[in-house]
Image: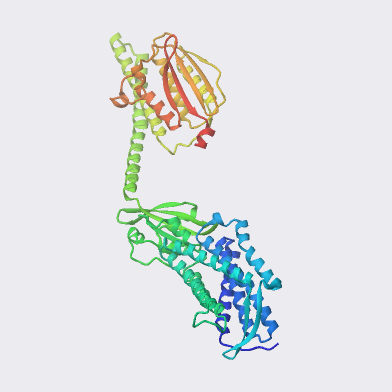
């Protein structure tokens, strides 16, 4: 087999080598990080270009007419695959995944497949109508007269090529650096061979006749694609990153590639972080303060950046078609919120100290007082007036002890850290009734059918029932108060009813009885205990209200959501 050598083949060989290297790199990328449509289509596209340019170079080196014609047919395998693959790549690159259906993609290759069959068999000269050898600048070249199917295949390829360029071009207008640079490299790379092809096919000088330079012009996209891949991380970070982050966010936005290296920052990042150092190209652990805090599964963290200024870093996974590509880090100034939180924490600490003083120091002293009063009442001869005064002091002291208990329960009720768990309302209610029954033997408690219903609560649920039960006894005007406890449940919640036969509560009082009152926790009546009841029930996601009992008295109705319902909410 005879060969010829020509400088025309060098750009084609160069394009084949570069495209082959890019295709191999993309294949390795898929093996390391898994498939995604952009990388797979890029690998196929560069492989098609490599095959196209390589077989064209071989055709140019060959002298034998039959071998040249075979090489001519083979080069169209790469040429016809390139256009639909570039269109698929454009769809994947711009994240139009709804169009990347398997059947849609397969349909794009129907025309190329039919064209290749016709080209190799050439029935009725549909593929080509003739061919001849000629000499141009001392080089033997093959000239082929296109048949109808060749013309149709050429038009089809151009349509897909320009559609792909339009999709990427439209998307490039919405992007910022480095994504606009990525898109520009892709467009320029594909535009050059498109212009060369138009000049070749229309016979426009200086490309009229002679050696077909369309494959040689593919050296340009090989170079621009290579720059896009290696310099601008084409396969690592795509325009999806910019779309995810938002083009005009007031927050600082940092884009990381899959290796957690900074590949993009917007104009707000460095002022928010209080740094003038360059961030691009640096590992995130060096560029962003406290970045290592994300290693324990957290998605956000607060960072003190300078003086008393705080920013919140939030890390958002960046993926395409389920494949990880990197992360977007938002940087937001949260100084006012952080200062409020710190002040609130300090105030809570102070309240906790006060709570300890009240519940331990004052409670211990008052228990000592009540013990001495009991001793005096039991063992010392007293006048009626002195005894009455001491009994009044004892009641006040016992009430103070009760108030310290209520204060502790209120602190727990407003503490979000108080651990909750699934509790059976019926079991808790029965235990509460027994506790109150022991303290008030003069009262008659009747417990009706209680449902087996589970709510999401904590030990304070017992305080709810105990406070309502005690309230019914203490404020009764009967010598033997009668309290009836019952409950019902449905698919969403459980309702507990505690009915008494006392004097009842007026409609005006029903609307305010659960408040702390104008005089605070020491307001008259049952304000303290019932305020506690309402606070705890609200924290459990429930409600409490009062109804009239028949023929007299009041009914406290407590509604609580079932554990499954609250979890779903």
Query: Can residue 401 be seen from the camera position used here?
Result: no
Left or right of residue 158, residue 403 in this image: left
Q: Position of residue 111 (x, y in %)?
A: 63, 65
Coloured how? rainbow
- Compared with residue 190, is residue 238 higher up or lower down, i.e. above or below? above
Q: Which of 441 and 67 is in front in this view?
A: 67
Left or right of residue 351, residue 88 in this image: right
Q: Nearer the viewer, residue 562 or 448?
A: 562
Q: Which of 206 and 515 is in front in this view?
A: 206
Q: Residue visible at 28% across and 25% down? A: 518
Residue furthest to the bottom: 138
Q: Residue visible at 45% across and 21% down? A: 557
- Compared with residue 340, is residue 511 higher up or lower down, i.e. above or below? above
- Compared with residue 476, is residue 542 higher up or lower down, i.e. above or below? below
Residue 153: image quadrant is bottom right
- Quarter of the image with the N terminus in it: bottom right
Q: Residue visible at 37% across and 18% down? A: 374
Query: Can residue 407 be seen from the camera position used here?
Result: yes
Q: Residue visible at 49% across and 72% down? A: 191
Q: Where is residue 119 in the image (x, y as percent from the top left)?
A: 67, 72
Q: Where is residue 240 in the image (x, y as percent from the top left)?
A: 48, 59
Residue 398: image quadrant is top left
Q: Position of residue 193 (x, y in %)?
A: 52, 75
Q: Nearer the viewer, residue 169 or 565?
A: 169
Total marks drawn? 0
């Amino acid at each position: 087999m005879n060969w010829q050598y020509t400088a025309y083949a060098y750009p084609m060989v160069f394009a084949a080598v570069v495209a082959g290297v890019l295709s191999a790199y993309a294949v390795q990328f898929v093996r390391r990080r898994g498939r995604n449509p952009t990388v797979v289509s890029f690998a196929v596209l560069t492989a098609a270009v490599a095959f196209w340019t390589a077989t064209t170079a071989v055709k140019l080196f060959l002298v034998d007419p039959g071998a040249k014609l075979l090489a001519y047919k083979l080069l169209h395998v790469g040429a016809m695959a390139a256009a639909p693959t570039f269109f698929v790549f454009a769809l994947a690159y711009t994240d139009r995944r709804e169009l990347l259906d398997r059947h849609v993609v397969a349909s794009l290759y129907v025309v190329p497949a039919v064209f290749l069959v016709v080209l190799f068999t050439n029935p009725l000269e549909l593929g080509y109508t003739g061919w001849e050898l000629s000499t141009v600048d001392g080089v033997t070249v093959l000239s082929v007269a296109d048949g109808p199917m060749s013309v149709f295949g050429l038009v089809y390829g151009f349509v897909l090529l320009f559609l792909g360029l339009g999709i990427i071009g439209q998307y490039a207008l919405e992007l910022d650096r480095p994504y606009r640079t990525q898109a520009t490299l892709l467009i320029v790379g594909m535009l050059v061979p498109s212009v060369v092809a138009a000049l070749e096919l229309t016979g426009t000088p200086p490309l009229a006749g002679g050696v077909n330079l369309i494959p040689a012009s593919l050296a340009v996209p090989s170079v621009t694609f290579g720059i896009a891949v290696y310099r601008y991380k084409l396969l690592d970070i795509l325009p999806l990153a910019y779309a995810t982050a938002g083009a005009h966010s007031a927050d600082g936005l940092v884009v990381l590639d899959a290796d957690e290296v900074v590949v993009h920052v917007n104009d707000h990042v460095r002022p928010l972080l209080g740094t003038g150092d360059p961030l691009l190209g640096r590992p995130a652990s060096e560029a962003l303060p406290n970045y290592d805090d994300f290693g324990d599964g957290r998605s956000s963290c607060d960072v003190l950046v300078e003086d008393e200024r705080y920013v919140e870093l939030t890390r958002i996974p960046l993926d395409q078609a389920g494949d990880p590509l990197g992360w977007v880090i938002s940087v937001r100034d949260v100084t006012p919120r952080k200062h409020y939180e710190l002040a609130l924490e300090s105030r809570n600490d102070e309240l906790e100290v006060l709570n300890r003083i009240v519940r331990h120091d004052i409670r211990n002293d008052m228990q000592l007082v009540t013990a001495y009063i009991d001793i005096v009442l039991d063992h010392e001869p007293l006048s009626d007036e002195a005894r009455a005064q001491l009994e009044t002091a004892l009641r006040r002291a016992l009430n103070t002890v009760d108030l310290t208990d209520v204060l502790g329960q209120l602190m727990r009720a407003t503490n979000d850290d108080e651990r909750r768990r699934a509790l059976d309302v019926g079991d808790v209610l029965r235990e509460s009734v027994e506790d109150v029954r022991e303290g008030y033997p003069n009262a008659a408690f009747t417990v009706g059918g209680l449902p087996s219903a589970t709510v999401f609560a904590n030990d304070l649920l017992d305080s709810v029932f105990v406070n309502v039960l005690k309230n019914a006894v203490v404020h009764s005007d009967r010598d033997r108060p009668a309290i009836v406890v019952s409950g019902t449940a449905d698919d969403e919640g459980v309702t507990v009813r505690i009915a008494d036969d006392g004097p009842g509560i007026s409609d005006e009082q029903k609307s305010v009885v659960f408040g702390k009152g104008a005089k605070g926790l020491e307001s008259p009546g049952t304000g303290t205990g019932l305020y506690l009841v309402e606070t705890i029930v609200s924290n459990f996601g429930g409600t409490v209200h009062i109804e009239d009992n028949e023929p007299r008295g009041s009914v406290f109705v407590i509604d609580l959501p079932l554990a499954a319902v609250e979890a779903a909410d």
